Amino acid sequence: MVIFAWITYPSREERDAINAKVMADPRLSSDKWTMPFDGKRMIYGGFKSFIEL
């Protein structure tokens, strides 16, 4: 399953302010960051269709 999402902002200035706050969050700068999934399994796991057109 592929999921795509996006965020819309009222203005560019508000977007820039929010992004600055997010990037200043200390949880994002941790040295203990690891991938939340095994990339090898994701790449080689294969795909299965659930809708046939």
Image (cartoon, rainbow, N blue to C red):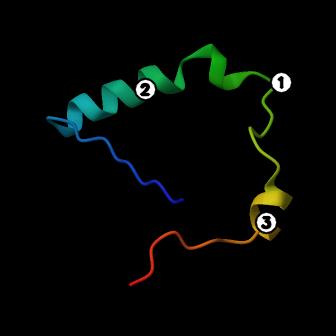
> Badge 2 is on which residue?
20
Q: Is residue 35 above or below residue 26?
A: below
Q: Specify the amino acid type for callout 3.
A: Gly
Q: Is residue 42 left or right of residue 23?
A: right
Q: Position of residue 4 (x, y in %)?
A: 42, 54
Q: Is residue 49 above or below residue 38?
A: below
Q: Is residue 46 left or right of residue 49?
A: right
The answer for how far apart the CA atoms under marks 2 and 1 are is: 22 Å
Of pointers 3 and 1, the one earlier in the residue sequence:
1
Residue at x 32% of width, y 25% of height: 17
Tags 3 and 1 touching, CB below 8 Å: no
Q: Nearer the viewer, residue 2 or 18?
A: 2
Of pointers 2 and 1, the one earlier in the residue sequence:
2
Quarter of the figure with residue 49: bottom right
Residue at x 85% of width, y 60% of height: 40
Mark 3 or 2: in front is 3
> Badge 3 is on which residue?
45
